[in-house]
Amino acid sequence: MLEGFFSFLFEFIGEFFLYMLFDRSSNPSKKRINTEIEKLKTESWFKVLYEEPNHKKRFETNDSVRHFIGEKGAKRIKNSKKHQQELIDLLHEAHLFEPSFIDVGKYSSSLTNKKK
């Protein structure tokens, strides 16, 4: 009976440590993401992207962009044209799926003056 309990306990502890090791790497912390962004800012190509106001907002708020940076890490992104392009593609995708706001007042006079 006691042997089964210890077996369960060791298995549970082992799975817990594996979960902690692997789950953290797939869900990077805010601190890690921000650190990786700071490292990337030393790269001229990244600096140009980051300084563009709409992109800067995405680096700060978009979950997909931030997760990618945290998961890949600055070193891997710096050393891989493929990862650099993937990051740029994510920025463009984030732009496509952001809500856009149209000033309806700007167009309302032309809508109401149309003949029926």
Image (cartoon, rainbow, N blue to C red):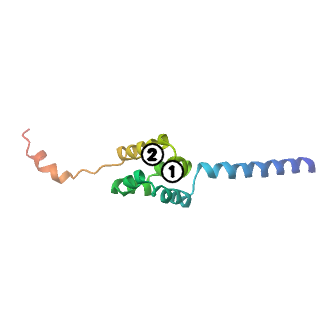
Disc sitting over residue 69 in the figure: 1
Who comes first in sequence, dot 1 or dot 2? 1
Observer able to see residue 73:
no
Q: Are marks 1 and 2 in contact (CB under 8 Å)?
A: yes
Pinpoint residue 50: horizontal percent, then vertical percent.
39, 55
Classify mark 1: helix, strand or loop.
helix
Q: Which one is in front, 100 or 79? A: 79
Q: Residue under circle 2?
A: 87
Residue 50 is marked as none
Helix, strand or loop status at disc 2: helix
Q: Nearer the viewer, residue 62 or 114?
A: 62
User: Which residue appears at 46% of the width and 42% of the height?
Assistant: 86
Can you say which quadrant of the picture contains the C terminus?
Answer: top left
Q: Position of residue 34 (x, y in %)?
A: 51, 59
The residue at the point 48 percent across, 55 percent down is 40
Picture layout, residue 79 above or below residue 54: above
Q: Amino acid at mark 1?
A: Ile
55 vs 69, left or right, is: left
For the point 36% across and 57% down, the residue is 51
Residue that appears at 57% across and 57% down? 29
Count of residue discs: 2
